[in-house]
Amino acid sequence: MNQKFVYQFQEGSKEMKELLGGKGANLAEMARLGIPVPPGFTISTKVCQYYYEHNRTYPESLMGEIKEHLAQMEKDAGKAFGNPHNPLLVSVRSGAAVSMPGMMDTILNLGFNDDVFEYQLKNGNNPTFICDSYRRFLQMFGNVVYGIPHHLFEKVLSKVKEQKNVTLDNELDQDGLLQVIEGYKKIYIDEKGKGFPQDPLVQLMDAVNAVVGSWNNDRANIYRRLNRIEGLLGTAVNIQAMVFGNKNMQSGTGVCFTRDPSTGDKGLYGEFLLNAQGEDVVAGIRTPKHIRELDAILPHCYQELLRILETLEGHYRDMQDIEFTIEDAKLYLLQTRNGKRTGAASVKIAVDLVNEGVLSKEEAIMRVEPNSLNQLLHPRFDPSHQEKAVVIAKGLPASPGAAFGKVVFTADEAQNVANGGEKVILVREETSPEDIQGMDSAQGILTARGGMTSHAAVVARGMGKCCVSGAHGISVNEEEKYFKTQLGEIIHEGDIISLDGTKGEVYKGELPTLPPNLSGEFGFFMEWADQIRRLDIRTNADTPKDAQQAVQFGAQGIGLCRTEHMFFEGERIQAVREMILADDVQGREKALAKILPMQREDFIGIFQAMQGRPVTVRLLDPPLHEFLPHDPDDIQELATEMGVSLAVLKEKIDSLKEFNPMLGHRGCRLGITYPEITKMQTRAIVEAACKLAQEKQEVHPEIMVPLVGTDKEFISQKEVIDETAAIVMKEQGITIDYLVGTMIEIPRAALIAADIAKHAAFFSFGTNDLTQMTFGYSRDDAGKFLGAYIDQKILSVDPFQSIDQKGVGRLVSWASKEGKEANPTLKLGICGEHGGDPESIVFCDSLGLQYVSCSPFRVPVARLAAAQASIINRKA
Amino acid sequence: MNQKFVYQFQEGSKEMKELLGGKGANLAEMARLGIPVPPGFTISTKVCQYYYEHNRTYPESLMGEIKEHLAQMEKDAGKAFGNPHNPLLVSVRSGAAVSMPGMMDTILNLGFNDDVFEYQLKNGNNPTFICDSYRRFLQMFGNVVYGIPHHLFEKVLSKVKEQKNVTLDNELDQDGLLQVIEGYKKIYIDEKGKGFPQDPLVQLMDAVNAVVGSWNNDRANIYRRLNRIEGLLGTAVNIQAMVFGNKNMQSGTGVCFTRDPSTGDKGLYGEFLLNAQGEDVVAGIRTPKHIRELDAILPHCYQELLRILETLEGHYRDMQDIEFTIEDAKLYLLQTRNGKRTGAASVKIAVDLVNEGVLSKEEAIMRVEPNSLNQLLHPRFDPSHQEKAVVIAKGLPASPGAAFGKVVFTADEAQNVANGGEKVILVREETSPEDIQGMDSAQGILTARGGMTSHAAVVARGMGKCCVSGAHGISVNEEEKYFKTQLGEIIHEGDIISLDGTKGEVYKGELPTLPPNLSGEFGFFMEWADQIRRLDIRTNADTPKDAQQAVQFGAQGIGLCRTEHMFFEGERIQAVREMILADDVQGREKALAKILPMQREDFIGIFQAMQGRPVTVRLLDPPLHEFLPHDPDDIQELATEMGVSLAVLKEKIDSLKEFNPMLGHRGCRLGITYPEITKMQTRAIVEAACKLAQEKQEVHPEIMVPLVGTDKEFISQKEVIDETAAIVMKEQGITIDYLVGTMIEIPRAALIAADIAKHAAFFSFGTNDLTQMTFGYSRDDAGKFLGAYIDQKILSVDPFQSIDQKGVGRLVSWASKEGKEANPTLKLGICGEHGGDPESIVFCDSLGLQYVSCSPFRVPVARLAAAQASIINRKA
C-alpha cells in the first residue's frame, strides 16, 4: 500500500476537505492564494480512519512520511526541530471535514524541551516569553496528551500568582514563571512517575495520537450526535510552525469575521489580545479588544488584515471567520472558514450576497440552514415592559433572542429541571464542552466571563439559544448556588431572571414577550423560498391561537387538528368522563350531547382563524383511559361527582386499563365500537362549517379517520360520517364541501393503501405512530435503549427526529405510489413531527407529496426546507 | 331482471350447491338418480342474498315463481295446498352451501289450518295422527315464525300429559291432543293478539321469511365465525311435500351413516324411531333404536335403504349421512350429504377408500380436515388406572377422547372457569345451540339426554371434544348446581370428574392419561402426507419433554426454543433477578455465571431429545420487568432475599416499568445494551453442543437473535455470538457447526430484509409479533375490539389465528423474496402460531419457505396441511 497519508500545505486545496479536514484544506487554500500562513503539513483523515479500523494502530509508512514533511517544513521555516539554537516549535491541531468547535484537542509550542528552554532562556532576547511558552506547552501537553487534570496545573499557577500578588497570567515575571515551570514538571513526576518526553519527535507522535484519540471522546461523540454529523472518515492533524502572539506587545492574536455573525451586518467584526496566544481569546479569561482598535496599535497589520479578508470573502463567496496571529508586528493567518452565524445573520448575509451580485437566489436559499430560522421566530421582550425593567447585569449580546427561566448553576441541574417541564437559565462562571447538554436544555445562558467568541457564545448561537456572556459585574458562586450582582443583590437557584441576548441585558423576574418581526430581509428571503418550493406547508394546530400563529408564519392550511386536546379542557372533561363511564349507547349519547356545542365552538374558532384554508380534523384518537384519573384521591372525587360508588368506578377504570395502550382500543377502533362518538364529532365539524358557510365564509373541513389498518374500518367510519354530514346539511339547509380521508400510521394501512385509497379523499402519513410500529419502538419507553443505539451507531439518527427513509420511508413511498394509482385524485400529506424536519421534507418532496404539516413555529423552517428540497430534487 | 329464483328438484344437481344449498342440491341429485324423494322445489340462495342487499325485501318476481312451482308440486304429489279433502302439507327447511347443523330453523306440516284439520279429523282414518301433526305445526310455526317462547308450548303440553298421566308425547290420546291444540291456539291469541294465519300461502311466505331471517341470527353468525364460514350468498329454502313418520307404527323416521362416524368402520350406522317425526330423533327426547333393528320391523324398507345407501356412497365417493322417513311402510329419502366424522373416522375412511380403489392417495389427503387430526392426538386414560376406576355413570360414546375437569352446569360458567385457566366439564340435561361457546371452552361434555346424533354429540365431534351423551342414569339439577348418579351420589359444581368419550363412561376424580396411538391407518395416512409435502415441519419446544413429544409426532427439528421459559424455573429466577438488579456489568456477569450451568443442561437435554435434528434457539426476548415480582408482599420478600432495602428495590422495579412493554426494551435490545446476556446464552448453547459433539452425537444449533429491526443490530449481536462461540470451541478443543440467524417479527426487519440477509444464515418469521405490529394490535388488549371487528366483518378472521395474507403476508412475501435474492443460501421458516394453521401453511408453501414450526400437538396437523398445500399450490 503506497498510499499517501501526509500533505504539505502547498499540496492541498479547499476542495480536499474530506481528506485534509476543513482547517487543513483552508490552510492549503490560503497558502495557494499567497496569504501569509506559517509553513506546515496535514496528516490526512485517512490516518484516523486507518487507526480505528486497525485496532488503534497507524499505517507503517506514516512515520517516514511525517519525517519527510517535517524536513520540508524545517526548510521553509528556516528552523530545526529540537535544535536549541534555532528551534522549530509547532502546533498540533485537529480538524475534521466539518467544524466542531471546542470539541477536539490542540497542542501549542510543541518541540520545547529542557535543552531548548535553557539555551533560549540564556541566549534569547525575551526570557519572559520563553518561560511563558514553555509553561504553556508543559500545561497543554500534560493535560491533553497525558490526561493530567487541568486543575493541578491551575493550582500551581494560582499559588505563584498569589505569592507574586498578580491577577493575570501575563503579569508574572520570569522568576514566577520559572517557579511555575518547576511546579509543572513536578506534576508530571507525581502523576506519571516520570518527566515529560524530551525528544520532540516523541512529543509529536504522542500529540498526533492524542488528537486522533480525541476523535472518539465523549464530547466529540455528543457533539456529532447533537449536530447529526456522520459519514466522516475522522479528523486530520495539522502540524504547523508556531508563530507567537505572546512574544511581546508587538505581537498578539485574534479572531475576526468579515460580517457580524449576530446580525449579518457587513463590516469587520472580531476581537484580539496583545501579547497572547491563541486560546486566550476564545477561553474568555481576559476580555479582548475590538478588532478595530488594532488599527491604532499596529496599523499596517490591520490594513493587511482588511485586504486579506476581502480576498478571502471574495474567494469563498461567503462570510469568513478567521484566526490570526501577529508576531513581532508580522501578520499570519492561522485559519479561515465559512463563519458560523445566527439565523438572522444567515438570512441577512444570504440576501445581501444576492443583492451584491455574488449569489443567485437559489444559492442563497441553499446557504441558510432551515433550523437556524428558529432563532428568528422566537419572541422578543415587550419594549414597553422592558424599558421599565431594572437591569441587574450587563454583558455581551452573545446570541440574540429573549428568554426567561429559573436560575440553575450546573448543566446537570439544567437538564433535571428542564426535564420536569420548567424553563431554566443556565448561569456559569464560564461554560465548557462538558456543559453542552445542559445548555441544550436551557432557555438561555448567562456567563460572567468570556467574549463574543467564547465557548458559551459560539455554542449558544449554534443552538439558537439566547446568551449573554462576559457579564463581569456578577460574581457566581456555583458551589453555594447563587450569584451576586454588582449592586450586591443575591439571586438564588430557582429565582427567575430574564435575558435579552440581543442587548446583552439581564433582568430580574419574568418579562412579557412579543412575537418576532418577520419582515425585512426575512420577508424577502421567505418570498424567494415560496417561489421555489413545490410542497405546500400546513400546520398542526388544535386551537384558534395556534392556527393564527401558524397563518402568520405562512401556513397554508391545518394538516392535523387533534380533537382530543379539546376533550381535556375545563368542564368538558367532566362530560367526557360521563361518556366513558356510561353503560350503554344512550348514556354515551347523553354525555356526548353535552360535548357537542363546546366542540362546535372550537371548530368555528379554528375555521375562522384559517380563513378558508383547508383544515384536517382528526377524530378522537387516544384510548379512553387517558381521560380518567389514576390517582386514588382523584378517583374518589370523580366517584362523588358522578354519584357512583368508588368500587364501581374503580372497576370501570380497571376494565379500561391496557397492557400496551399504543396498540390498544384507540383511534377508529373507538369510532367503530362507539359510532356515536364519530357522529358527535362529525356533527360538530359540519355544524360549524355550515354556520360559517351561512355567513359566506369559505371553509374546507377535511375529516380524518385515525389509526385505520383495514379498508373496511375506513369504509365503515366514512359511512357514519357521510350519513351524519348529510343529516346536518339537510337540517342547516346548506351544502358544504368536505373531504373524508385517513391517517396512514399503521404499517398495514401502508401495505394495503390501494384498497383504502379507493374510498379515501386523502392520506395523511402519521409518521410518529408509523415509526413506532414499524420499528416496534414505544416512544415513551425507547429512551431506555435509544441513546445506546445512537452511541453504538446501531442507528445513525433518532428515527423520531428524522424519517427513517429505508424502512418507514419505504412504506410511505409504496403507499403514496399505490394509493395514487388506485385513486389519482388522492391528496397526500404528512403530519408527523417529521413534517418539520428539513431532511424528511426533502424526502417527502421526492415522493411527490402535496404538503407537509408541522407545528406553527416550524412553518418557516419547513417553507425554507421545502424550497431547498425542490432545488435538491430537481438536481437529482 | 328476469332472473330465475326457484328450482324444481328435477332442475338441479349436486354441482349447484352454491345456488341451491347443500340440502337442495343433494335432494335434486337424488331425484335425478331415481331415489324416492318427496316432490318439492328450492328457493335459491340468490333470494337470501337479494333480501339482505335490498333492505330486507324480496325480488318482485319471486311470488309468481313460487306459485308456479307449488302448482307443479301439487301435481307431482297429487294433493292440493289448503284443500281440506286432500291437503298438501309441506316442510320448509333452510340449507346453505355449507352444512350448519342446528343453526337454521325448520317448519314441518305447513299447510294445516282449521278447515283442513276439522275435515281430516272427521273424515281421515287416523285422528290421533292428524291431531299430533296439527299440534306440531302450531308449536313449530309459533316458535320459529312468530318467536313465541318454546316453554309456553311445553307448559301446555306438560300440563295435559300430567292430567292424562302419560310420559311421552306420543302416548297422548286424541282428547289430550285436542286440549293441547286448543291451548296452543290460545297462546297465539295471548302472545300475538290474534290467531295464526289460516291461509297456507301466507303461512308459506311467513315461513320462508323466517328461514331467510334466521340466516343472520346470532346462533348462525356465531357458528359461521367459529367455523370460519364466509363468502356464502345466504341460505336456500327447500319446500317439500311432507311424508309422515308419525302416521302409525308402519311409519317412522331416522338418520343413518354409511360408515361409523366415530371410528370410520364400514357398515350401516344410525338410529330410527317408529311413529315419530324428523326432529324427534335428533332432539334426543326419546332414545332411538339402532338402524339394524329396522330389518326385523320393516324388512323391505331396510333392504331398500341398504341399496340406496350403497348407490349414494358410490355416487358421492364418500361416506353419506342421510335422513329418511317411512310413511305407511314406504321409504323416502329426505336428505343426503357427506357425513361429518371424527378425526379418526376421517382418516380411516380416507385410507379405506384408497384401499377400496375409490380414491387416489392425493384425493384421500385432501379429504381429511387437518384440524380434525387433533382428536387423534389427545391422550387416552391409562388403562391400568381406568380398569380400577369406579364408573359413576354410563352414556353413549358420542365423541371420542379422554378428559377431566371441574363440573359446571352452564355455558357461561364453563367460559368463566376456563378463562381462569382451569379445565371444565360441561354437564347439561341436553345442550342447545346457545351453549356452543361454553362447549368450546370445556374439555368435555356430559349430557343426560340425547343420542349419538343429538346436538351435544354432533357439535362435540365437530369440535374434537370428548363427549358422553344420553347418560340417562344421572339426574341433573342445573339450578342447584349438582347432579345425582343412579346410585344416589351427588356431584357438585367444582367437583372433578373424568369422561371417556370413546367408551361413554364417567368417573369420579381425575384419571391419569396416556399418549394416543399413532400407528395403523393414521401411520399410513401420515406417511402419504409426508411423501407429498414439500415443507418441513418443525416444532416450538422449550423442554426436552416437549421436544420428545414433537419428535414422536414427526417434527423434523425445533423452529423455536424460547430460552426465557428456562429463566423462570425454580431457583433460577433468583439468579435472574440478581442479574436484573445488578448495578453494573460485573454484577450482571456474576449472576449470569450462576445461570450458565443450568441453561447449559437445558440445552443438552433438548439437543439429545432432538437426536441431531436442527434446533433454533432464540436468545432472551421478554422485557426484564417480566421476571420481577409486582405484588407488594413478593417485593418485600425479594428485598429481604437480595439484602437490599424495599425502597431501593421498588425504585429499581419502577425504573424498569414500561408504558408499552411490547414495544419496549426487549429482544436484541437487551442483548445490545447488556451483551453479557448474549455471551452467557451463546456459551450455554455452544458448550452444550460441544459436549454432545465430544460424545459423537450429532447436533445442529441455530442461534436466533430476536426482535431485530436494523441490520446493525444483527451484525452487532452476531459478532458477540461468533466471538463467544470461537472462545468456547477453542476451550473445548472441538468445532461444531452452528448458524446465526434472526427472527423477522418487526415490520422494519421485513422492509430491509435484503440488508439483514447478507449477514444472516436464516430468517424465522415471528408472525405473532409481526401481526401485532403490522396491525397495531396488542394481543393482550385487542380483545376489547376484536370481537366487534369480526362480528361487524371488519375482519373476516382473527389475524392471530390465520395469517393476514394481504398485509402481514405481503411483508413475509417481500422479505422472503428480497432476503433470498441477497443471500441465496438463506433458510426461511415461520415460527409464529400461524405455523400450525392449515390456511397459513398453504400460504407459507406458496412462498417457498423451507419449514413451518408449531406446537408439538399441532405437528401432525401441520404435516397434513403441508401435504394439502403441496397439492393445492401445484394445481394453482
Image (tube, coloured by chain):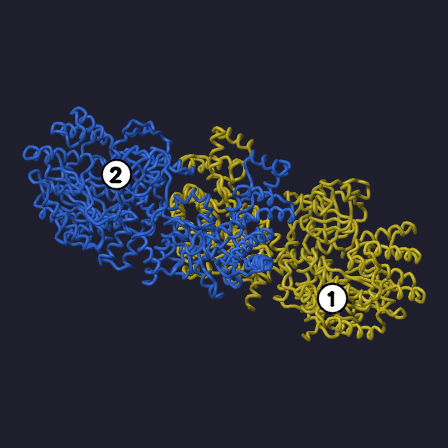
Chain colours: A blue, B yellow
Which quadrant is the C terminus of chain A positioned in?
Answer: bottom left
Q: Chain of mark 1?
A: B
Q: CA distance from mark 2 to mark 1?
A: 93 Å
List x then y, in percent, for residue A535: 39, 59
**SS at mark 2 in the image:** strand
Q: Quadrant of residue A647?
A: top right
Local crowd size for mark 1, using a 10 Å CA cut-off: few (<14), some (14–19), many (≥20): many
Q: Both on one chain, marks 2 and 1?
A: no
Cβ–Cβ under 8 Å for marks 2 and 1? no
List x then y, in percent, for residue A733: 58, 60
The answer to whether residue A152 is left or right of residue A567 is left
Residue at 18% from the left image edge and 31% from the top image edge:
A168
Residue at 80% from the left image edge and 45% from the top image edge:
B475
Which quadrant is the N terminus of chain A positioned in?
Answer: bottom left
List x then y, in percent, for residue B315: 71, 71
**SS at mark 1 in the image:** strand
Front residue of this view, candidates A818 and A774: A818
Q: What amino acid is found at the position of numbered circle 2 in the picture? A: Leu
Residue at 15% from the left image edge and 25% from the top image edge:
A164
Q: Chain of mark 2?
A: A
Q: Is residue B263 visible?
A: yes
Front residue of this view, candidates B660 and A355: A355
Q: What amino acid is found at the position of numbered circle 1 in the picture? A: Val
Q: Nearer the viewer, mark 2 or mark 1?
A: 2
Local crowd size for mark 2, using a 10 Å CA cut-off: few (<14), some (14–19), many (≥20): many
Residue placed under numbered mark 1 in the picture? B237
**Figure disc tally:** 2
Residue placed under numbered mark 2 in the picture? A396
Front residue of this view, candidates A211 and B570: A211
Q: Is residue A868 visible?
A: no
